[in-house]
Amino acid sequence: MVKILLDCDPGLDDALAILLAHGDPNIELVAVTCVGGNVALANTTRNALQLGEYLGFENIPIAAGAGEPLVRAAEHASHVHGTEGMGSVSLPDPSTAAADIHAVDLIIETLRSQPGTVHLVATGPLTNIALALQKEPAIVEWAASFVIMGGSFTRGNTTPAAEFNIYADPEAAAVTFAAGWDVVMVGLDLTLQAIATPEVVDRMRLLGRLGDELVVPLSTFWNDDKNPEWNGQAVHDVVAVAYVTHPEFFSSRPAHVEVETAGEFTSGMTVVDFRADSHNATVPTRLDVDAFWEYVFESYARIQLP
Ligand code: BDR
Ligand code: CA
C-alpha cells in the first residue's frame, strides 16, 4: 500500500488527481492539504471538502493552509478553472468544516508520525511545502518521496518561461528545490503528453455517473482557443500521482534545478541543468501514454459513489 499526502489547489486537474488517489486500491490517501492557487484558498478548500463528501472519504483529514504566496500577491487561474475552481461542476455544500489544524502542521505531523512511509505530492503552488520546510526541515528525511507537478525544462504556460505552480510562488519553489531532497519535477513537458483527447473523453463517458458528473466536465471545461494545435486539456496533476505508484511509466533524468525569482521576463522559470554534476531533482521527460490512461481508467472504474 502506497501512502500519499496530497497538497493541492483544486482545480480541475487537482480534482482528477484526488479521484485517482481515491480509486487506486493500492493508494492510501492519508491527508489532503489545500493551498491558494488556481483560485483562492477558501475555494480550493471548499472544493476538496465537497469532493471528499461526494466520494465518501472516511477519516481523511482535509486542512486549509496558506492563502497567499510567501512574499508576492496571489495570482489565480480562474480563467482556466472557473471562478470557483471546478469549472462547470457544482457539488452540494460541504456539511463539515476543514480539519482544525493548519495544513503546514498537518504535513509536518503526518510525516513525523510515519517516517519513511508517506509520499508527499504537491500539485499547487509550493507555499505550504516551503512553510513546512521552514518550520520543520526534517520533513526532508521523513517523506518517502517528494513529487510535484510544476515547472518545465522547455516552456511555460502562464508566461513563455514559467509554469503556473512555480510562477504563482517562485520564492516558495526556490526554498523547496534548495531543501536537500530529491524533487521529482513532473513538469509541463511531461504533463502535456497526458491529454484528454476526444478519444479519451469518449472513454470517460463510459464511466457512468462519475463520468457524467465529474470526470468529463472536469476534463473538458477549458479550451485554449489561442492554440492552433489544441487537442484537449492536459490532466497535469493526475500525472504526479501516477508517478508515485508507476514510475516505470516514465523515462526520467537527474538534473539540477534552480528557480528564477528575479527575472524581468522569466520570473518563475525552472532552470533545468541536465549536465550538472550535482543533482537536486529527478525530471521525468517521457510518458508511456497508453499505460498511463489504462491505469487511470482502471482506477476511476473502481470508484463506487456513496
Ligand atoms: C498546473 O497549474 C494549475 O492550473 C493546474 O492545476 C496544474 O497544477 C499546470 O500548470
Ligand atoms: Ca493544481
Image (cartoon, grey):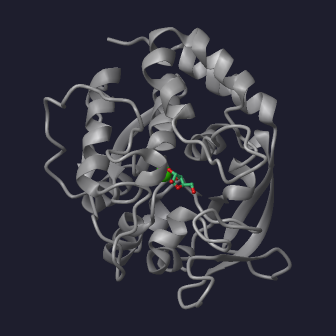
Query: Viewer-proximal residue, 258 or 117?
Result: 258
Quadrant position of the C terminus in the picture: top left
- Counting from the top left corner in percent of width and height, residue 300 is at 55, 20
Say which quarter of the image contains residue 163. bottom right
Q: Is residue 297 left or right of residue 61?
A: right
Query: Viewer-proximal residue, 45 or 211?
Result: 211
Image height of 132 relative to 45, above or below:
below
- Counting from the top left corner in percent of width and height, residue 14 is at 47, 43
Say which quarter of the image contains residue 84. top left
For the view shown, which residue lies furthest in the right direction? 275
Look at the image and tell me whether residue 1 can be seen: no
Q: Residue at x 77, y 29 (%)?
A: 291
Q: Residue at x 62, y 85 (%)?
A: 265
Look at the image and tell me whether residue 229 can be seen: yes
Image height of 189 relative to 43, above or below:
below
- Counting from the top left corner in percent of width and height, residue 289 is at 79, 35
Q: Residue at x 56, y 82 (%)?
A: 267
- Counting from the top left corner in percent of width and height, residue 260 is at 59, 84
